[in-house]
Image: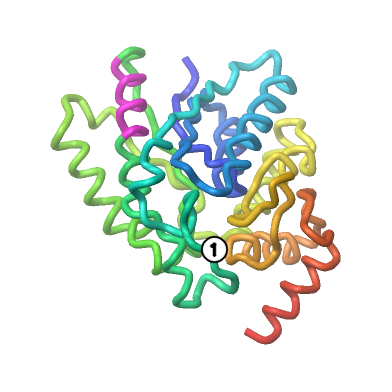
Amino acid sequence: MNKQAVLSLSGGMDSSTVLLHLLAEGYEVTAVAFDYGQKHKIELERAQQLVDYINLSRINEPNVNFKVIKLDGLVELLNSNLVEGGDEVPEGHYEEDNMKDTVVPNRNKMFSSIIQAVALSIANEKNCPVEIAMGIHAGDHAIYPDCRQEFRDADYNAFIEGNWDANKVTYYTPYLKGDKFDILKDGEVCCEKLGLDFDGVYKRTNTSYKPTAEGLSDYKSASSVERIEAFLKLGRKDPVEYVDGWDIAKTHVEELLANY
């Protein structure tokens, strides 16, 4: 039996690379995405496109099992700039205080509880260990309390206390000591190992919190700035399409970083 992993696949660069990493390491993967009324719903479409691309490219391997969980009934009850009806998503760098407006209350706890339930169900059904894979990294920011190790430890302890046989489920965090550049660099290695086209993979991801209706990425919100910065450091053009094009996006981020 293949090693088993469960992944929250947002459709962004980090979780998409974790998916590649798991497959390259021989895991059979169950991937779950969440529709919570986010403005950047294009990420759900990209996640599905990526899974379809991977499954079609690896026809002799087990398919990635992908499900979208609908939580969009919460949209009118959540106070955050990231959800539909919220204020404008701020621009700038993550270190700026206004980025707290991008916090969605208790988002990772909601996601974590569902992921844990899925992982434990697989562990009990197949009578095997299951790892919950996460793309958390050293660059996760202080403005997100639910990205901190203290939160994750407390959450896991609650899961262990609240379920029989929960010790069958553990966590796998391959990028804990790296940053977005390290993640993207590993993505290159994994694409080569899996026989996947790097641009074909990453054009099927979304990091922008302010995409256009057509799915073009912005280049001024903090999430986009970090993504572009990682591609610049890697020395590659980002294959997603940006408003105003890659050259303008690239120049904007280079100037922002030079003046930061």
Q: Is mark 1 on a helix, strand or loop?
A: loop
The residue lying at 82 percent from left, 60 percent from top is 246
- Which quadrant of the figure has residue 257? bottom right
Whether residue 233 sits left or right of residue 143 in the image: it is right
Camera-side residue: 202 or 38? 38
Q: In the rendered structure, does residue 131 fall within the stretch colored magenta?
A: no
- In this view, the residue farthest toward the bottom is 259
What number of labels is visible?
1
Crowd class of label 1 (few under 14; some 14 to 19; many from 20; radius 10 Å): some
Q: In the rendered structure, does residue 122 fall within the stretch colored magenta?
A: yes
The residue lying at 25 percent from left, 43 percent from top is 156
Whether residue 223 sits left or right of residue 163 in the image: it is right
Camera-side residue: 86 or 256? 86
Residue 93 position, x and y percent, is 57, 73
- Which residue range is magenta in the image? 114-124
Residue 177 position, x and y percent, is 48, 59
Q: In this view, does 139 lie above or below 168?
A: below
Type of secondary structure dominating the magenta stretch:
helix
- In this view, the residue farthest toward the left is 161
Whether residue 143 sits left or right of residue 248 in the image: it is left
Q: Is residue 159 above or below residue 13?
A: above
Q: From the image, which quarter does the C terminus lie in?
A: bottom right
Residue 248 position, x and y percent, is 83, 68
Residue 152 position, x and y percent, is 30, 51
- Which quadrant of the figure has residue 105? bottom left
Whether residue 5 sits left or right of residue 183 in the image: it is left
Q: In this view, does 3 lie above or below 142?
A: above
**Residue highlighted by disc 1:** 89
The residue under label 1 is which amino acid type? Val
